[in-house]
Image (cartoon, rainbow, N blue to C red):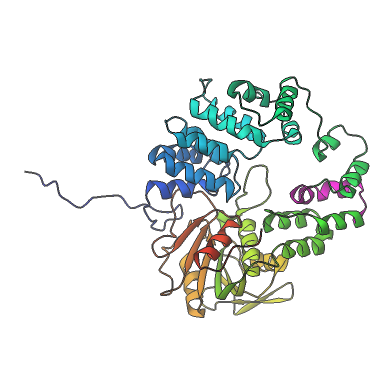
Amino acid sequence: MARVNQAANRPTIHTHEGAPAKRIDAEAQLRRTLMACLLWERSFYEDGKGVADRLREGVAAVPLEAAGRLAIEAREQMHLRHAPLLVVREMARHKGAVIGDTLARVIQRADELSEFLALYWQDGKVPLSAQVKRGLAEAFPKFDEYQLAKYDRATDVRLRDVLFLTHPKPKDLEQAALWKRLANNELETPDTWEVALSGGGDKRGQWTRLLAEKRLGGLALLRNLRNMREAGVDDALIRQGITEGNYRRVLPFRFIAAARHAPDFEPELEEAMLGALADAPKLPGKTALVVDHSGSMVAKLSARSDMTRFEAACGLAILLREVAEQVDVIAFSAPGAHGHYGLHGYVGGMRVDIHPERPHLAVVPPRRGFALRDALDQATCWWGTNTDDAKKLADSRGYDRIIVVTDEQSHQKLSDPLPKTPAYVVNVSSERNGIGYGRWTHIDGWSEAVVRYIQAAEGVGEIAR
């Protein structure tokens, strides 16, 4: 008789670079895929369709309530837009009141109403489920005329289509009149920078007016600095706009991108970036911050972005520098990188110490802001990924907590942190397998929620919003 009660012969799984990876449960795998996912965008190792398919598989493999919690977290904490919508669309293939509740919370911008319907009908038009209708109907009243007009675009699915299909209940007569204007294509044209500039004409005059009237949000201002310069807008007015901008929810890597395109404004950009973090509660003690500078980290965040995962990691490093009392920053790649060899190098006049036996590691000097970005970028040259070498260097220097920022695609298995110390792996990609588990607290994604999570976990308090 053949024996049945035998040890499971499960194949070992690995990262894309060959290190043994931790096998995780379905909910953790869905979280891993979702929290850093820019939907349909290729990562360094995986194409966008494969990642989207894994999201679909992940939703089917977990309870609806778990999928709903993750979708809400991805939208509200990680500020992702399209990936949470796909999660809810896959949830809608099943039945449960959580679907409508989740959809109503995930939709936070007016165009997401029509974008969700486009996803729902991506494989062909089908009737809307009762929960989808309820979720869309509950989300619709969130938006005023400005928001509806701003996102009422001539796409295959219009906002008026959502209105007709879901029959939301207006909260008062004024909102009922607004929806009638939407249905009749009579919304008042919003005064946005997109509308102001879409007709051509005097771009310099339009930018000048928008800045003077403070009509630009912080993110819109950062994204358009180069356009303003090219239009001939007065530098003093631009500098004033940067200084007075509202940068709530704007991450440091956005300032990095703005400074690259408009380096003349770097002092104002750095002051605004650091000022937004000035009142954040501090993580006590010494933090070891280990930043991945391997080849896969130079992958762009999206096809339309010139920002890389490494620059997102630099943004987190800048953020963490401001909220930790003492920080020891280590950059790493792998032996063979064509970086500095010897005990130290000088980068832009700064001394950068190099581990004598492992030239792929660098202890970065205690810089802040853009200077920290520059030091990280030049301390090592990207190559492979020897994560554990960097972690062991941090061990040798001591710490009260350790934070590793990486895409986890390593040549090496990650060993345990020092005993009785908080230890975090921040995964900035959505690759299938990773190494940062076991005694490590695993965090997926790169928003300021990472720091707020660490502060809450250690009882420090919440980062200023």
Residue sitting at 47 percent across and 67 percent down?
423
Q: Position of residue 295 (x, y in %)?
A: 57, 56
Q: Where is residue 8 in the image (x, y as percent from the top left)?
A: 23, 50
Residue sitting at 52 percent across and 73 percent down?
358
Give residue 273's quadrant in the image.
Answer: bottom right
Q: Nearer the viewer, residue 186 or 57?
A: 186
442 sits to left or right of 107: left
Q: Is residue 291 magenta?
A: no
Dominant secondary-structure state across the stretch colored magenta: helix
Which residue is situated farthest in the left direction here?
A: 1
182 sits to left or right of 430: right
Report whether residue 340 is seen: no
27 sits to left or right of 362: left
Q: Where is residue 241 in the image (x, y as percent from the top left)?
A: 85, 54
Q: Where is residue 253 in the image (x, y as percent from the top left)?
A: 68, 56
Q: Which of 453 and 290 is in front in this view?
A: 453
Vertical side of 222 occupied by 396: above or below: below
Give residue 136's quadrant in the image.
Answer: top right
Residue range (magenta)? 217-235
Residue sitting at 59 percent across and 63 percent down?
462
Vertical side of 142 occupied by 456: above or below: below
